Amino acid sequence: MERLPEVPGGMAGAALTTWRLVHDPVALMRDLAARHGRTFRMALLDGPSVVTGDPAMIADIFGGEQDLFDAPNEIVGPLVGDGSIVLAGGARHKRKRKLLAPPFHGARMRTYGRIVAEATARHSAALVSGREVAVLGVTQRISLEVILRAVFGIRDDARVEALRVAIDRNVAGFPAWLMFLPFLHVDAGGFGPWARYRDTVRALVALLREEVERGRREAGGDRQDILAMLLAARDEDGAPMPDDEVIDELRTLVIAGHETTATTMGWALWQLHRNPSVLERLRAELATAPGEPEALARLPYLAAVCDEALRLHPIVPIFRRRLTRAATLAGHAFPAGTMLHPAVLITHFDPAIYPDPLAFRPERFLERKYSPYEFIPFGGGNRRCVGAAFASFEMQVALGTLLPAHRFRLDADTPIRLAMNGVTTRPVGGVTLRYVGR
């Protein structure tokens, strides 16, 4: 059996690789794939791993027996809480997924579509002609309002602002380097980065607990938000989800849903204004459709634009799975406990799958249907992001509402590097466009 190539390791090698993963994951994965192929062994500060961008091996990981893998997401536990679906395994994970999936499908999406369109119109109305726009600031305000209204049912502006500040501080307090250095997760007498981060957790949890208590008081009304559904949900034994678990699921939804959608919309707007022919084709498609959210969500080129933004700028650069027992994957034998990393940044940049992979070319998603092991921005298998459909829907409605009503210009087409921002990625320095006008 062919021996997998190995990236030079040791503590120095693991530290350098981890640093590169945090600061420039695209360059790291492209470099390693060019030198070692689609699958190789690599050491990070949290341990040795097998990294793969091979769809055959990814299919064995994402499509394999559920009890063959667990998701060792302890490094993100401080961000989402011990009760989050992200950390749950086995039957507990299955139960949580069953409780969380219904709000993101079916008729409720129509309600969320109106929320997305209204939030986009409101936050874009403040743009001033001729001024530069920090695009991520706008998309984050849109995405956060959508999350707070769709998840919590909040209408009060002061409450929205309080949660916005708490969420921003919480995310900023858990940078990627702190995530990969668990030996720093000590309070040190109330000083240091970990103590400061724990203060942001306590502040956010206190606000979320108030929302859960409000939801309990208003139970039985006509609320359609996700919090109301979580509070009303019952497991097979008829038991409700404990409040602490509800709070951790809310933390997961807010942090994962807010940051990821906003960032992808920012990338999409940047790429559209770097590629005028793509923008022109998208505007022509938008002109043929009514502005209703459901109609926007059915536009094929708009969907392809969002998918291509997710391909080129994935929010999560690598995923994590650990073998619970020895197994053979894509012809390679691995012992129990092997850490496996399906690498989005290898698969999505593989020229054999995506010709001219560095080009922003949405047409590729109309010309070919990619398998769930070739296009993996939301992960895969039984741990695929439970809010993936909602995220795609939100991006399509927001962009489809914004672009027909407003014009922007890219003054300087300078490259923007993608780096890790906590557990997700973000454009370094943000995205700047100039607002031309309505």
Image: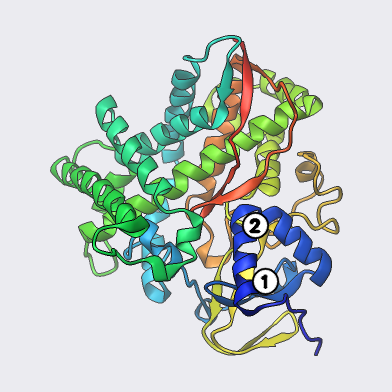
Say which residue label 1 marks: 51
Q: Quadrant of residue 100?
A: bottom left
Q: What's the residue type where badge 1 is placed?
A: Val
Query: Image point 67% across, 59% down: which residue?
Result: 344
Residue 376 marker: 2
- Say whether residue 415 is left or right of residue 49: right
Give the mark nearer the N terminus: 1 vs 2: 1
Instruction: Give the CA separation, mark 1 to mark 2.
Output: 15 Å
Q: Is residue 367 above or below residue 10?
A: above
The x and y percentages for residue 99 are 36, 58
Query: Image point 57% across, 22% down: which residue?
Result: 133
Decide which of 123, 194 is in the foreground and name it.
194
Query: Image point 34% across, 45% down: which residue?
Result: 226
Q: For the image shown, how many numbered marks are present on the structure?
A: 2
Residue 314 visible in image: yes
Badge 2 marks a residue whose secondary structure is loop
Q: Is residue 408 above or below residue 308?
A: above
The x and y percentages for residue 173 are 39, 50
Comparing labels 1 and 2, the label whose residue is closer to the camera: 1
Q: Quadrant of residue 352?
A: bottom right
- Say whether residue 98 is left or right of residue 38: left
Q: Quadrant of the C terminus?
A: top right
Residue 80 visible in image: no
Decide which of 16, 229 is in the foreground and name it.
16
The x and y percentages for residue 2 are 81, 86
The x and y percentages for residue 53 are 72, 66
Badge 1 marks a residue whose secondary structure is strand
Q: What's the residue type where badge 2 is placed?
A: Ile
Characterize the local packing of mark 2: few (<14), some (14-19) or many (20 or more) Cα atoms within 10 angstroms.
many
- Say whether residue 352 is left or right of residue 63: right
Residue 283 marker: none
